[in-house]
Image (cartoon, rainbow, N blue to C red):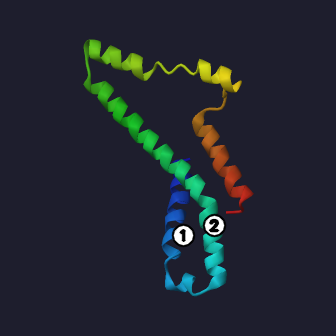
Amino acid sequence: MNSRLESIERDYNELEVSLGSPEVLGDQNRLREASRKYKQLTPLVQCIRDLWSARGDAAAAKELMIETTGDERESFRAEATAADTTSLEEWVGFKPATPIAVGIANFVSWYRQFYAI
């Protein structure tokens, strides 16, 4: 999954650079097509970047957990694992059963198919 997400982000970055190139700017058809793809990919890439950020936060939390000991470690563990989503699930009326990695992979596949990218 990581390689697919990295590939999408890399394509997006290349597309972003191409939007400023004289070759694309001088050809209305290429500019229109590049702009359309860029607009379609932007929300997906933002989601991917949010995922990278969350993973970085999780890695930092894990490292912090390793560095702590005793009561401090137990307090941190309790805080880090105490996410109670019951009220959200009741409010929304839904409890997800799909793991986040599977859900993101499914979303990426759907998005690429839907927008033909």
Point 40% across, 19% down: residue = 79
Kindly identify the amino acid type of the residue bearing the numbered disc 2: Lys
Q: Is residue 72 above or below residue 42?
A: above
Which quadrant of the view contains residue 69?
top left
Q: Is residue 85 above or below residue 6?
A: above
SS at mark 1?
A: helix
Q: Residues within 10 Å of mark 2 (few under 14, many from 20)?
A: some
Name the disc covering residue 37, or none.
Answer: 2
The spot of residue 90 in percent (x, y) is 67, 20
The spot of residue 11 in percent (x, y) is 54, 64
Which quadrant of the view contains residue 96?
top right
Q: Is residue 95 above or below residue 49?
A: above
Point 28% across, 12% down: residue = 71
Farthest residue in the right direction? 114
Side of 110 where 82 appears, left or right? left
Side of 39 where 79 appears, left or right? left
Task: Decide which of 55, 30 is in the foreground and name it.
Answer: 30
Point 30% across, 29% down: residue = 64
Of label 1 and label 2, which has the lower sequence position?
A: 1
Mark 2 and mark 1 in contact (Cβ < 8 Å)? yes
SS at mark 2?
A: helix
Point 59% across, 66% down: residue = 38
Q: Residues within 10 Å of mark 1 (few under 14, many from 20)?
A: some
The spot of residue 107 in percent (x, y) is 66, 46
Q: Which residue is mark 1?
A: 15
Q: Is residue 64 above or below residue 49?
A: above
The spot of residue 93 in percent (x, y) is 71, 24
Cα–Cα span, label 1 and label 2: 8 Å
Kindly identify the amino acid type of the residue bearing the numbered disc 1: Leu
